[in-house]
Amino acid sequence: MPKPIKFTYKKKAPFRDAFFFIVVCEGKNREPDYFRFFDGLSSRVKIVSVESGTGSAPRLLIENAIAKEEELDARAERDSLWFVIDTDRWREQLHEIRQECNNHPHWLVAQSNPCFEVWLYFHAKAGIAQLQNIAQCNNWKPYLPTIIQGGFNPDFHPVAIETAIENSKASYLANGYFPEPGSTQLWQLGHKLLPLIKKELDNLKDKFPSPVVIG
């Protein structure tokens, strides 16, 4: 099957009254690269990816969030901030982030179990992945190229975010506020983000209607 065409579009400068959609990422590459795809699609919102930097421990992510909001002069009544976190390494410490969010009503959490690759999987497939040792993050990274030809590419595959929202929401299972293995809360973030970029996203999908090639 042919390789999907890379999306190219002119990034739009935000309006003066545009608001911030800040995504604090545990990862250094895959998560920030994913969300950068959407920044500049709409002039109504500025999507800011915050990389983990020197570490991904929960306390460092909280410090990164505070520093970025101060840098941007973010306002709680207008802007929102999401922590995109995994379950694999910091299960006990993740409670600290959720407790901190109680002090910041515009702070929200989108957790995946065990890792961000679960969310990427749902761009191509519905239902819980048929993967042995589904709770092990190391098993997910080589699994993605077996279901998405060439592996997940942040240059074009994020355009299928609506499919990912529908698939991951339909399969979502949780124990309290922790998603079960193979589940992710990123559909909740997607629900908030999608209305801000939907018109521009639809224009891209009309141009290239089938960005995900199933392996």
Image (tube, rainbow, N blue to C red):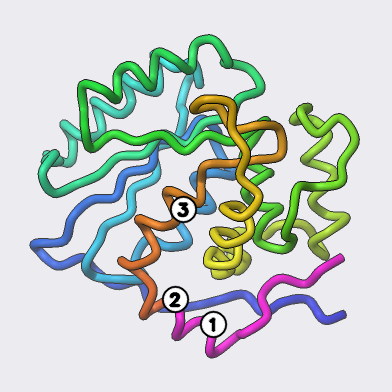
Across and down, in percent, residue 109 comes to: 41, 34
Q: In this picture, is 81 found above or below 167?
A: above
Across and down, in percent, residue 180 comes to: 66, 31
Q: Is 208 in front, or is 52?
A: 208
Q: Residues within 10 Å of mark 2 (few under 14, many from 20)?
A: many
Q: Which residue is mark 3?
A: 35
Q: Is 30 in front, or is 177?
A: 177
Identified at 66% across, 22% down, the residue is 88
Front disc: 3 or 2: 2
Q: Which residue is mark 2?
A: 201
Q: In this picture, is 1 found above or below 85?
A: below
Q: Which residues are magenta?
A: 202-215
Tell me, yes or no, whether the two marked residues, 2 and 1, touch with CB atoms within 8 Å. yes
| Disc 1 residue type (three-letter) | Lys
Q: In this picture, is 81 found above or below 137?
A: below
Q: Is residue 144 left or right of residue 11?
A: right
Label 2 vs label 1: CA separation?
A: 6 Å
Q: Is 63 in front, or is 84?
A: 84
| Disc 3 residue type (three-letter) | Phe
Q: Residues within 10 Å of mark 1 (few under 14, many from 20)?
A: some
Q: Earlier in the sequence, mark 3 or mark 2?
A: 3
Marking on residue 165: none
